[in-house]
Image (cartoon, coloured by chain):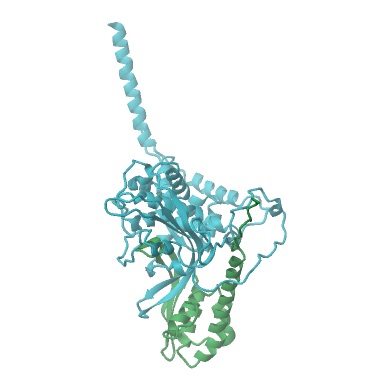
Chain colours: A cyan, B green
């Protein structure tokens, strides 16, 4: 018999007080400020902005501090805050072709207009712990060289000129928004991209890796990877024209994939697209690979039954806030549910025991 | 590009510049240039969001990328000029300063403000961008071909 109980308020209050103390850690060690997190843990900040789906470095830094560095908890805080904001409007689509690039590389063309610009990358580092960072010290200034002026064209445009790659046709139909309407299947590509750009980095990486290992293989080249800032422009009704309201840093990845052709399309290269808030090329490349795998149907490819081809599987499990919410709720009190399970198991055992006795008697 | 003044719509250009200015910078330049005039709020500063869109493949159909925080406000000077601000981030004081500059740019103070707020701001932001571009340029790969040693 289950009896309803109340209580736990004091335990909860005390748990929160202790949490605050543990978050602070040893008070002899200087406290981290929000700006320190924003400036020195910027890739963590970037991830929280991307998966929190809200670009605001100060808020993301605050969330990381509050969450004691648990990035999924921080993303949860950002998502919760996001729902409290009134939406003023929607921007014009950002023009990544005019991006002020910090980094721009292509794995398909060595010599391309604008060149291979490495930017502040971890690539080519030796992945050896740098104990100099453990000691405080001055750092040398990054070298400079005269910059070229002019826009840096997208690599896929070169292939486009020869007609060797599918075109991304301009269109201005307003896209669906999964923050306004629940994600439902079948999901068109615009919806898939919105879900993927805020999807869990680890899950997206795992799925992308699975396509490379042969589950829905679609051999991908990184046609181009670029990181930089673009202005965000929004139409302001009370002014009657659009203005730049800010600037965001984005990571963009375009993959170029082999395609043998189908009933409707000639042999050509096809494209996967990844675009993520902040500086996060692992996520952008993963997103592009998964985007390409999910396009099997529109490209007339075979469904190989691979996880990365299954839009429902991918999109319904990629959101780490939904996932962690459901996963972690099972640790909360389920006394009533469990009590009934307990009764059931006891009853089954009694019945089984009774029949054993009966069988033995026969 | 977008950071230079657009002859066709100077207001669009200055509002964009004010929106992208670093924290506290507009207020500082404004206060150094002029005593703030009296005004009434038409819309007190409020924080909200804007959904940022992008295009598939950079050029294709649009999709929703995610939101940015935005602060907006509107105010009216005593003579009736209306100033608006829409600026990225949660920055009410900066929004107020930006809306004041927007309103004052419609008055006789425009020339003074252009010289003491907009032009310095643009110069600073252009310089900051140039530094980043120069650092990026220094990481550009110069390929060279190794001579094959066959003879």
Residue in view at x 48 percent, y 59 percent: A224
Residue B45 in view of the camera: no
Of residues A89 and A7, the one nearer the viewer is A89
Residue A231 in view of the camera: yes
Q: Position of residue A128 (x, y in %)?
A: 66, 48
Q: Is residue B66 above or below residue B22?
A: above
Considering every residue shown, the one lying at the far top of the view is A362
Of residues A5 and B30, the one nearer the viewer is B30
Q: Position of residue A241 (x, y in %)?
A: 37, 79
- When asked about the image quadrant of residue B85, the answer is bottom left
- From the viewer's perspective, tell me whether residue A65 is left or right of residue A344: right
Of residues A114 and A313, the one nearer the viewer is A114
Considering every residue shown, the one lying at the far bottom of the view is B108
Q: Position of residue A47 (x, y in %)?
A: 50, 55
Q: Position of residue A65 (x, y in %)?
A: 56, 55
Of residues A114 and A242, the one nearer the viewer is A114
Residue in view at x 48 percent, y 56 percent: A108
Q: How many marks?
A: 0
- When asked about the image quadrant of residue A255, the answer is bottom left
Q: Is residue B23 above or below residue A278?
A: below
Residue in view at x 27 percent, y 6 percent: A362
- From the viewer's perspective, tell me whether residue A98 is left or right of residue B123: left
């Amino acid at each position: 018999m289950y009896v309803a109980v109340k209580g736990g308020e004091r335990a909860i209050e005390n748990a929160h007080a202790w949490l605050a103390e543990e978050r602070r850690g040893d008070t002899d060690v200087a406290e981290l400020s929000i700006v320190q997190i924003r400036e020195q843990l910027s890739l963590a900040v970037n991830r929280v902005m991307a998966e929190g789906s809200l670009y605001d470095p100060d808020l993301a830094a605050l969330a990381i501090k509050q969450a004691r560095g648990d990035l999924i908890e921080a993303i949860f805080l950002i998502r919760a805050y996001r729902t409290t904001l009134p939406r003023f409007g929607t921007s014009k689509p950002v023009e990544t072709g005019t991006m002020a690039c910090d980094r721009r590389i292509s794995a398909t063309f060595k010599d391309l207009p604008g060149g291979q610009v490495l930017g502040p990358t971890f690539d080519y580092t030796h992945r050896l712990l740098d104990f100099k960072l453990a000691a405080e010290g001055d750092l040398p200034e990054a070298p400079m060289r005269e910059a070229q002026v002019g826009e840096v064209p997208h690599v896929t445009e070169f292939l486009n000129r020869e007609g060797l790659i599918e075109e991304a046709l301009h269109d201005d139909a307003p896209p669906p928004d999964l923050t306004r309407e629940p994600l439902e299947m079948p999901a068109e590509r615009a919806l898939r991209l919105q879900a993927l750009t805020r999807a869990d980095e680890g899950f997206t990486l795992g799925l992308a890796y699975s396509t490379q290992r042969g589950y829905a293989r679609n051999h991908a080249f990184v046609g181009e990877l670029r990181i930089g800032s673009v202005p965000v422009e929004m139409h302001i009704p009370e002014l009657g024209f659009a203005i730049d309201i800010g600037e965001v840093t984005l990571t963009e990845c375009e993959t170029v994939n082999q395609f043998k052709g189908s009933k409707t399309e000639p042999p050509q290269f096809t494209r996967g697209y990844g675009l993520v808030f902040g500086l996060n090329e692992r996520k952008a490349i993963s997103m592009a690979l998964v985007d390409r795998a999910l396009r099997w149907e529109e490209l007339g490819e075979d469904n190989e039954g691979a996880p990365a081809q299954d839009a429902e599987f991918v999109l319904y499990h990629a959101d780490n806030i939904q996932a962690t919410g459901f996963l972690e709720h099972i640790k909360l009190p389920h006394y009533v549910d469990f009590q009934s399970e307990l009764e059931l198991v006891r009853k089954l055992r009694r019945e089984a025991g009774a029949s054993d006795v009966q069988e033995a008697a026969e | 590009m977008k950071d230079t003044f657009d002859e066709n719509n100077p207001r669009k250009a200055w509002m964009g510049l004010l929106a992208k200015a670093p924290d506290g910078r507009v207020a500082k330049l404004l206060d150094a240039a002029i005593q703030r005039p009296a005004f009434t709020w038409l819309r007190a500063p409020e924080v909200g969001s804007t959904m940022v869109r992008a295009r598939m493949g950079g050029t294709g159909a649009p999709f929703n990328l995610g939101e940015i925080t935005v602060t907006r406000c509107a105010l009216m000077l005593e003579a009736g000029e209306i100033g608006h601000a829409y600026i990225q981030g949660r920055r009410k004081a900066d929004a107020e300063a930006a809306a004041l500059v927007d309103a004052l740019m419609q008055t006789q103070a425009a020339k003074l403000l252009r010289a003491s707020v907009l032009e310095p701001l643009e110069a600073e932001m252009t310089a900051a961008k140039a530094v980043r571009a120069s650092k990026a340029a220094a990481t550009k790969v110069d390929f060279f071909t190794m001579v094959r040693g066959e003879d």
